[in-house]
Amino acid sequence: MMLHIVMLAFYGINSCDATTNKNTACEAHLNTSWDGNSTCAHSRDSECNVHVTCGLKTITQLVNLISSPEAVSRLDISKNSLVEIKEHMFLEYKNLVALDLSYNSIQVIQRKAFNGLMKLKTLDLSFNLLHEWDTLDITKQLPSLTELNITGNPFWSPGQHIRDLPNISYISGIVTYALPYENKNCVLCELQKHADMKNRISKVNLVTVDGLHCFELLIDFGANFSAVWHSNFSITCAYRYDLCKSPPFTKPPSNISVEFIDGCFLGIRTWGLPNIPIGIATMMVNFVVMATVALTPSLFKKANMVLMASMGLGDFLQGLWLLILTIVRISMSSLEFFDKKMPYLCYSLFALLVTAQSLSAFVSFIVTIERYLCIVYSTKPNVRITRKIAIALLVLVGLLILGVNVTPVALQMTSPFTDYSCLNLHVPNKPFFLESIAYVSVISYVVSYILYARIFWTVRRSSLNVGIQREGKLAKRIITVITTNLLFLLGPMIAGQLLVTLYDLRWKTKIICWNAVLLWFLGINSFFNPLLYAFRFERFRRSLKLLMKGRPNEVGVVPSNN
């Protein structure tokens, strides 16, 4: 390390020699000094101004580490463990123009701490724990100061003495607010003297920060703060990436309040309200299908009816998912939703949706195979999916669904803050899990179409076979359900991709469409599935009528026309 520093010093001397011819003056300050485990590295810029960077245990060690403080123009003592700046610590640094005290643990700055810094222009106090700074004489100590950085000091904010500095024009970090669950990203507000006066400070400021997409911040600076700053300063706020790194820096000063407003979540709650009646209606109509098949022995003995009831269960769960998700979202704020959604709420909702979609996709595929065997192999009665085989296949599907539902828990998948529907569970830097499941469903539907092409070809060739024609009608009903499933699955996916490509559409509008409007179609599809399939069976309708009339003894004696 020492060799590296010496080499830097050597090249620094040569550079300055070539341009300034001040060999002796440059050589005197290009070195590295030690005081125990503390060091200061000296360097020069292109104009031979001296820059010093120190690693200290206590600030008093500067006296031993820097022999000619009057030659230093920039002093960096950031990222140490300093807790207090005492009086006259920089008295000899008469030519210092920049002082960096950031990323320490400074809590107290005494009144005359900056005495002697008459030429100081930039002071960086960002990311400390400043509680007390007596600024009564600050105009005499720092008459040349133009820039002050106080980012990430939630317990202190500047007052009129800082405002009265004769050359102050820029104060950074007057508000540092880390957006909830945004980790290192936050909103930074800055004061600028005589900047854009349309943003001049008033008692209440609604600050919409570019780059936040969904969020707005309502900042109340309070009467005292406004009285001090409003006449000469304006405020600007911007979204800053990788700035806030730990909890103390996520809050504004105690005299400034910030209200977090999630516009996307509010819009989703409003536009998602239709999902309540859609969910209830979907659950009711599919419950009728499941109950009718379960209570009718003649229907429950048929493999295709057992599979039809299983499809009804999937659509019932789809309606239940819509209903629970919508009620949960309208019962809490976005912050409460995020607090509670991981891990249990999101994992539960995700499992419910995956079960619903998987049942619809896989059972539809099994029904397709059942129709295929029944029609294409009509001359081979032994080649069939019986009720026992159907139940065994359903058990297999259930185990597969269980494995899929356990995966997010096993891989500890997370959900981003703007995932308002628990759909975007994923391992960091990997595709969203639900996308993979959706692609598998689409593949199963495509294979079903291939099988149905063969089915309809067989039906056309067997125009005189009444049995095949009857089974063909049944197949048409099933392919109608599969078509609607595919359209209502692909439709939202395609619409979502189109929303992403519409750059002129506001991000908030896209999020609302994704998490509210497009979900309507999932519920509507699950509502119409039993109407397109189960309720078109004469046998099913007759069984339902008998149940509604309270004649359960006759339920099993139903003509089997189709």
Image (cartoon, rainbow, N blue to C red):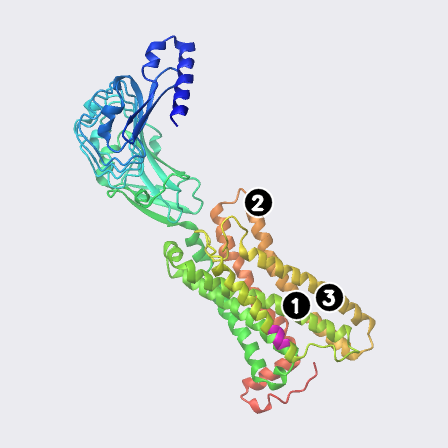
Q: Position of residue 93 (x, y in %)?
A: 24, 20
Give the residue drawn at x 73%, y 73%: 373
From the viewer's perspective, is the residue at label 1 or at label 2 nearer? Answer: 1
Q: Which residue is mark 3?
A: 451
Q: Nearer the viewer, residue 124 or 497?
A: 124
Q: CA distance from mark 3 to mark 2?
A: 35 Å
Q: Position of residue 455 (x, y in %)?
A: 76, 69
Q: CA distance from mark 1 to mark 2?
A: 33 Å
Q: Nearer the viewer, residue 51 or 303?
A: 51
Please check the rendered image and state whether residue 84 is part of the magenta-colored stretch, yes or no: no
The amino acid on which the numbered mark 1 sits, given as a three-letter code, is Phe
Q: Which residue is mark 2?
A: 501
Residue 387, relative to residue 173: is it above or below? below
Q: Which residues are magenta?
A: 390-394
Label annotation for residue 365: 1
Mark 1 Cα-neighbour bin, 10 Å: few <14, some 14–19, many ≥20: many
Residue 48 visible (yes or no): yes
The amino acid on which the numbered mark 2 sits, given as a three-letter code, is Thr
Mark 3 Cα-neighbour bin, 10 Å: few <14, some 14–19, many ≥20: some
